[in-house]
Structure formats: structure tokens, C-alpha cells
Image: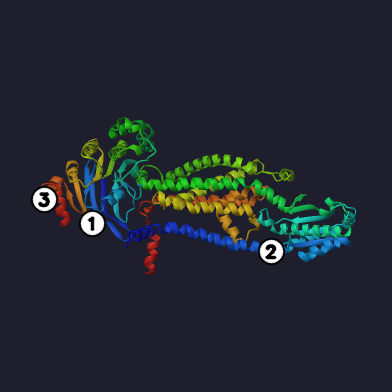
Amino acid sequence: MSGLGNITKKEIRELLTPATFVPIIMVALIFATMGTSLSGLQEQALEPPVIGVIVEDDTTYSTMASTILKTMAKSVYNSTSTADLQEGLEVVKQHDGVAVIIIPRNFTDQIQQEKQGTFEVYWIMKGTGLMDSISSGSLESLLSYVNTNISKQLIKQNTTVNASFVLSPTKRLETTSYKNREFVGLSPNTISGMLASQSMLIPIVMMMIIIMAGGIVITSMALEKENKTLETLLTLPVKRTSIVSGKIIAAAIIGLLLAIIYMIGMQFYFQGFTFSVGVNLATYGLVLNTVDFIWIGVSLFLALIAGLSLCMLLGTFAKNYKSAQTLTFPITMLALIPMFITMFADFDTLPMALKVLTFAIPFSHPMMASRALLFDDYLLVAGGIVYVGIFAMITISIVVWVFKTDRLLTGTTKFKWLKGLKRRRF
Amino acid sequence: MAAVEVKNLVKRYGSMDAVKGITFSINEGEIFGLIGPNGAGKTTTLRVLSTLLSINGGSVTILGYDLEKQAAEVRKHISYLPEDAGAYKNLTGRAYLQFIANFFDPKEVPAMVQKGIQITDLGGRIDDRVDTYSKGMMRRLLVGRALMTNPKLAILDEPTSGLDVINAQEIRKLVKSTAQSGTTVLLSSHNMLEVEYLCDRIALISEGKIVQEGKPKTLMEKYNARNIEEVFIRTVRE
């Protein structure tokens, strides 16, 4: 065998280890699950929006508008009286629809007097994620199409019409209902956009802490082995729980410090891109109070402990600094996946598989907490805190157990129950 | 009372038997040497006695404590020096000794650190970072660490491994004086001269079994050998 072939063969043998491949395979499986689930959203985007239409006016422009809406959207409720609004909203909600549109009595008259005709849009918001606003986005496009068609009709009929009016002969009076609240003057798109920009900070902080502190924990374990200090440490009169906890706490402190430094830089970066859409969410009661911040803090702290204990467990597999670098990858992915999911979708509207996956990843919970608290969804936050607390306790117990076995030093574990099982089977 | 009682100790790594039912005891204040070729089971035995590895068979009592059931108690009274041990590279020698001493009785910490500094004999270099130390300096630091805590049982795996003649001689003297002050010492070594000089009794271990045990002089007489090296070669070949 040539020198090149010999070295290549040796390198492949060294790199082709379960520690390298298992995390990658797991991440690939997670992405496959996400892809399958998200493909449903793509199909949803291509489907016509489900709506209800109440037309009180049966003259030129209102007929034109209602015809376009009924043709290009899927209208599941039709009426001629605004008194039927509640009934319409119920029917549309049952059909998983997006809104009820009222074309009022004076719609055509207003346009003919060169005043904007008003569409009263009663939005049914499903979730606060950017992906959740796909249907409402489709309907907004459809209303713009109606606007364009009326413009063309106006120009055809009267070439001397006011230019600024003719470009925008209609306007929308919007009311969005979400989680038993009504937001007058806001569309789901506006709410989603504002919430996304407001709640982006926590996912980024969480991700940065986990990546930084997680790397520290895994590397610390690897260095204990590589520098041959672990054996001495394990023979000292100190509890295994103290060793594990000490490493986790130290990494959490350093991780937090690094994240703070990073966030100061990020804040300046974000300031450069911030723009105002003239909406103050506090006016609509969408503001977090002190108690909410305590909930978020507890959620963040527990997720950090859970994440670091998971890193500690991975760290027990690290033989040296090189293998530690490989083991940080799955943690990075676990931090990135919920960050993207929570940025683009709302937990409530996720497909079941993705919902289970998001809930199972401990880092998701502080990322979801701020939005959930804004809409008083304390059950999701409290449930997340309980789950992450249990996850952390179980993981720490497993790590302490590994510290008490030979696995840490020899790479093997004595499973008495497995031995018994093997004896029975063979 | 014997400081260490090992009865039919068995230790396996998967399907491989590293230690196959060895039995020996060490008296208090004695220096006991475990001697054998590479892979004979010396380090495994020392790791088991240091509470690092679990046992697959037999029993071990250290200073009256059952090793499996009272490992935490055992750790309070022993000190283990692995053959290829290292120290935390970012710490200075003094900070490392302080870190170790902090695990013991707070009242004794300053005295322990002082004793450690004295044993290491590193002079001003004790305040330098560990990653600037030579191999000999590092080993002296680790021996200092192992002996400064006044252990009732010191388990030393190749204590002079990799040291030059002068440094090795200093450490041997140190081990001898530690035993004279009441500490029981269990050591393993490849250096037969060292074993002859240091040990009150030795056990020759081969393929996980003790093949000979006794005082060095007695064994030399038994095999009509001039030194322990000859005894070692003959027992291993038998």
C-alpha cells in the first residue's frame, strides 16, 4: 500500500467512530422530521384562504369585490347582514379559516364620491409565528388585487379622477381576535412581525449560552482525561454530585458572562436595523410584567442547567480535546432548532410531530416563554418548567451514575441486569 | 490490624480478566511493593484499591472500611498517585496544592500546603504555572500533592517513573520517611533496586495472579538470587 493510501486508511479508521456519526445521524433525523412537518405549511400557502363574506351592499364595486373574493378564496360563510358576524366567525373558525370580511352598505357610494371604500376585516389569528400568517398574507394579497381591479375600473370610467385616490380606492378596518383577545386596528401580520422582533432576543441569548457554556463543559471533561487529572480528582474526598454540579455551575457562570458580552455587541448590531411600524404593543396589553420576567428567568435557568447536564453527559464520552469538538455539534443543533422553530412558528399551530420535538428539547421553553406569557398561556410555561426541571434532574442523576461507574475511566460499564438478560436469552 | 486486606480480588474488563483472584494484606506503616511485568494487573489492582474501579469478585478492606460499601470513607484516608498523572496546567504549583488541600479539614489546609511545598522542593518555581514545569518538577509536585495530606494509606503507581537518578533518589527517601511517620505505602514499580531499597514486603504479580509474596531478602534466599531482579525473572518465567 502506498504511503498516501496507508495514511488515508488510518485517518478514516480514526475518524469513523460512533461518537462522530451518532450525533450527525440524530440531527439528520430531527431535520427529516422537521422537513416532513413543514411541508404541510407549504401546501397551506398554495391553498386559497378560507373566509366568510358579508355583503350589505349590492351595487357595482361591492359586487365586483365580493365576486373576486368568492372566486379566488374559499368562502364558507355568506350573508347580507352584519348582525350575522358572530355566526360567520364561528363557521369560519370551524373551517380553520382566516377572516370574515364585511363589505358595508355605503361601499360603492363612498368610492363614487372619491372616498375610500372600507373593508371591515375580522381576522381569526391562529398563532403568532411568522409561518402562521401565511393564510392572512394570502388574503391581504387578495384584498390588494380587489383594490387594483377597482382602480382599473375607475380609470376606465373616468380619466380625470384624483390620482392618489384611484391608486388606493379601498381601505381596511381590521380587528384581530387571538386567544380571547381583540386587537382593533392590527392585522395578524403586524402582530406577528412585532412579536418576532420583540421576542428574538431570548432565543438568541439561550442559543449563545448553550453553545458557549456547553462547549466549556464538554471540553473541561475532555481535558480532565487528556491531562490525566481525572483519576486524582475521583480519589479525593469529594462527592461525585459535587464534582458534576461544580463543573455545571462554573460553566453556567462563564457562559452567562460570555453571553452578556456577546449580547452587548448584538444589541448595537440590532439597533442599526430597528425600524418602527408605529405600533406600541403595550397599548394592546402585550407587555410583560415583573412576574412574567421571573417566569422567564426560572425557565431560562432550568433550561441552562438541563443543557449543561446534557453536555456533561456527552463530555463523559469525550476522550480528548479533539473528540470534545465533535461532541459540541449536537448541542449546537439542539439550540438552533428550537430557535428557528419559535421564530417562524407558534407552538400551538405546529404539526403534532414538531410540537412533540419542540417540547422535548429543553432549550425551546425559555424561547417560547415570552410569547406565551404575553397571551397569558401560563400552562405552557409552567408545564415547560416542570418538564425541564425533571429533564435536568434525570440527566444529572445519569451523569452522577456514570461518574460512579468504571465507564468514565475505562469506557465500559458494568450492567448487572444486562448480563442477567444475556444469560437468559442465550 | 492490617491496613489493607485483599481477598480473592477479581477485576474484569469486558471478557478479559485483568486480576484473577489475588489475596494479600498490608500491615500498618509497612511499605508493600506490587511488582510484575507490563499488563500483569498492578495498575488495575492499585486503581481498585483507590476506589476508581469497581470489583467483580472478592473483597477489599482498607483501614477497616469495606471498599465497595464505604468508598467515601476510604477516600478520606488514602492518597493515590497514578503513574501518568498530571496537574491543572493553568494553575501555579502552589494553587494546585491549595486546590487539593481544600478538600480536607479546613484547619489543616495551610499546614498541608506548606508541607506540600516543602516536599516538592521547587523553590521559587512553586509560583510558576504548572505548564512551564519539566517532567521531573511535575512528578515532584504530584508526589508532594499525594503525601502532603497525611494519608493513612499512600498508593503510589511507579512513583519515580520518568525521573532522573537524583530526583528518583529524593523521592525514594521521601517515601521511606513517610512510612516511618506511620503512613502505610502500597507501591508498584518496574525498578527492582527501588523495590529492594524501599519495600518491607513485596508481591510478584503475573497474568493477574500473585506468584510470590514475602520479604525481599527471604525471596532472594529462596531463589538463591543476588537481587530481586533475578527473583522477578525466575518467577515470571516459571
In the drawing, what numbered circle is on residue B222? Answer: 3
Which residue position is annotated with label 1?
B207
Question: What is the three-letter code of the residue carrying label 3?
Answer: Lys
B67 to A141, vertically: above or below = above
The reply to whether label 2 and label 1 mark residues of one chain is: no
Left or right: where does residue A389 sit relative to residue A322? Answer: right
- Amino acid type at circle 1 is Glu
Residue B40 is labelled as: none
Lateral position of residue B1 relative to residue A368, left or right: left
Residue that lies at the very extreme toward the front in this rendered image: A159
Residue to which mark 2 is pinned: A46
Is residue A169 in view from this perspective? Answer: no
Give how far across and how far down residue B201 sits, in percent: 19, 45
What chain does mark 1 sit on? B
Dot 1 or dot 3, earlier in sequence: 1
**Is B67 displayed left or right of A327 in the figure?**
left
Q: A81 or A269, which lies in front?
A: A269
Question: Mark 3 and 2 residues: CB-CB less than 8 Å, in contact?
Answer: no
- Residue B24, percent across and down? 23, 50
Label 3 crowd bin: few (<14), some (14–19), many (20+), radius 10 Å:
few
Of circles 1 and 3, which is in front?
Answer: 1
CA separation in Å, label 3 and label 2? 94 Å
Quarter occupied by the C terminus of chain B: bottom left
Q: Residues within 10 Å of mark 2 (few under 14, many from 20)?
A: few
Task: Out of B153 and A230, give the one closest to the viewer.
Answer: A230
Vertical relation: B126 (above or below) A396: above
Which type of secondary structure does the marked residue at label 2 adopt?
helix
Whether residues under marks 1 and 3 lie with C-beta atoms below 8 angstroms apart, the answer is no
Q: Secondary structure at mark 1?
A: loop
- In the figure, B234 relative to B129: above or below? below
